Image: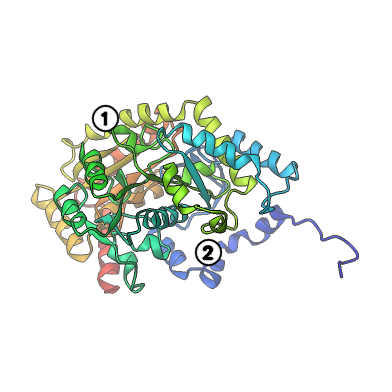
């Protein structure tokens, strides 16, 4: 029986005001306890109160520059007014969403717009995340080719659900979850290894990130096109995972479009398409693949997602693409990204601990390497002996603690910082980062002081955790 009176409105502001200070205790008690432990250890246990564009703000009003964008989700920054307005509109419309037995206009409209950025691709499947987009591509490639094995590249990251994990090139994520699907790794850029696997005749597809998120390594020039040719000669498919690189991140709408003549059979997208509000994943593909999977009315629901194509997600996607067009976001990513990398690259000769700057658009990798001078080499060697990646962590921490800039180490056991800021940043944010990064690197090259004291703390923790 329904209650006599309707439920009281939920006062979220009051709830957060009352319990917000318990955020880390709640995490430890009820969620993943290692997350709060890690944040406490490296001093990232901040209390952010609000966010706007590329900035977070604490209770005192201090701004923190976001160079992480929620792992690429917030391509438009946080709380873009156009996307927020679209979400309010779609809720206020009281649409008959997800009836299952009608065809809402919003998914078709978003698919139409999305495909306009990917000539040669014909249809879209909407799910809820990047890993779902990858799972869809794996299933469709296997069914369309009648083969079971998918090739992937060493150090790749394609998601953490069981199928996506089978094509994950990082052993640390796979450990303890085997057996997985019978897929096979090859080195990024190695045509010989690809040809050798294809000769076995059981390969359905190669899945590849045009720029790998881990370490920010791009496929060598011409490799994607040559790989595509080889795959098609052996009746196998090319899947481009653009979950992080797509929707403008690299200065083209999709990263594969930087190389002339590349037309993947399937493309995975997500993250930025959400506008930072409602999760959405998309798998774009050639018509014949979809037509094989959905070959009859009996197979109409052979692949589906409970919340796929929901109205809020579709509205967020449509609003995101409108902002991309109206504010020339992709062009900004290219121009500001070129400026950013140019200014960072100019520091390589200045700092012996700085080995390389690479990337494309606003996906930038800063790699550190073994210094020449004996004083610095001694500290570097101690860090490497304890755990590779500690020096990069030594840079990330003062960037946040002293300069209020949020960055990340690009992967486990890597001396690489990855910058994937909102695509709306300007030269102002580049200036702020460059000033902070230069000060941190100057400090590191003194060979002593707070940074190296923190480094010794990291060494003790790394050794103690073995």
Instruction: Depth check: give the residue in front, 281 or 432.
Output: 281
Based on the displayed image, in which of its 4 quarters is residue 158 positioned? Answer: bottom left
**Rendered residue at 81%/59% (across/down):** 8
Report whether 267 appears left or right of 111.
Answer: left
In the structure shown, which secondary structural element does the residue marked by tag 1 occupy? helix
Count how many numbered circles sit on residues in the image.
2
Q: Residues within 10 Å of mark 2 (few under 14, many from 20)?
A: some
> Which comes sooner in the sequence, label 1 or label 2?
2
Report whether 212 appears left or right of 35.
Answer: left
In the structure shown, which secondary structural element does the residue marked by tag 2 occupy? helix
Instruction: Depth check: give the residue in front, 362 or 130.
Output: 130
Residue sticking out furthest to the right: 4
Q: Which residue is mark 1?
A: 342
- Residue 390 circle label: none
Q: Nearer the viewer, mark 1 or mark 2?
A: 1
Q: What is the spatial separation of the Cα atoms under label 1 and label 2, in whole angstroms?
A: 39 Å
The quarter of the rendered structure image containing the N terminus is: bottom right
**Rendered residue at 20%/43% (across/down):** 354
């Amino acid at each position: 029986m329904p209650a006599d009176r309707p439920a009281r409105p939920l006062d979220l502001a009051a709830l957060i005001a009352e319990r917000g200070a318990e955020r880390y205790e709640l995490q430890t008690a009820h969620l993943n306890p290692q997350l709060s432990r890690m944040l406490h250890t490296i001093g990232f246990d901040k209390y952010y109160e609000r966010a706007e564009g590329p900035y977070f703000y604490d209770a005192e009003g201090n701004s923190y520059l976001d160079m992480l964008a929620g792992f690429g989700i917030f391509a438009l920054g946080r709380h873009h007014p156009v996307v927020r307005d679209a979400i309010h509109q779609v809720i206020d419309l009281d649409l008959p969403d997800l009836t299952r037995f009608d065809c809402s206009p919003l998914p078709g409209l978003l698919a139409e717009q999305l495909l306009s950025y990917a000539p040669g691709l014909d249809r879209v499947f909407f799910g809820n995340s990047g890993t779902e987009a990858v799972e869809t591509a794996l299933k469709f490639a296997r069914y369309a080719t009648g083969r079971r094995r998918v090739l992937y590249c060493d150090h790749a990251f394609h998601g953490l659900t069981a199928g996506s994990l089978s094509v994950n090139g990082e052993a640390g994520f796979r450990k303890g979850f085997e057996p997985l699907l019978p897929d096979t790794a090859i080195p990024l850029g190695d045509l010989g290894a690809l040809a050798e696997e294809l000769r076995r005749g059981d390969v359905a597809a190669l899945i590849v990130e045009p720029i790998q998120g881990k370490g920010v390594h791009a496929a060598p020039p011409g490799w994607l096109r040559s790989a595509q040719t080889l795959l098609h000669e052996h009746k196998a498919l090319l899947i481009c995972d653009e979950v992080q690189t797509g929707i403008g991140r690299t200065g083209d709408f999709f990263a594969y479009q930087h190389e002339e003549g590349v037309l993947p059979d399937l493309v995975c997208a997500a993250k930025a398409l959400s506008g930072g509000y409602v999760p959405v994943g998309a798998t774009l593909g050639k018509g014949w693949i979809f037509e094989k999977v959905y070959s009859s009315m009996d197979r109409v629901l052979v692949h589906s997602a409970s919340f796929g194509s929901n109205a809020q997600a579709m509205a967020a996607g449509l609003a995101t693409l409108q902002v991309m067009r109206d504010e020339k976001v992709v062009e900004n990513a290219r121009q500001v990204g070129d400026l950013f990398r140019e200014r960072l690259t100019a520091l390589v000769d200045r700092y012996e601990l700085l080995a390389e700057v690479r990337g494309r658009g606003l996906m930038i990798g800063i790699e550190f390497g073994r210094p020449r001078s004996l004083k610095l080499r001694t500290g570097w060697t101690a860090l490497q002996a304890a755990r590779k990646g500690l020096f990069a962590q030594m840079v990330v921490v003062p960037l946040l603690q002293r300069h209020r800039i949020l960055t990340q180490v690009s992967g486990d056991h890597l001396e690489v910082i990855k910058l994937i800021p909102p695509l709306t940043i300007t030269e102002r944010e580049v200036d702020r980062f460059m000033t902070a990064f230069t000060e941190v690197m100057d400090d590191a090259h003194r060979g002593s002081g707070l940074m190296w004291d923190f480094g010794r703390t990291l060494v003790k923790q790394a050794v103690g955790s073995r």
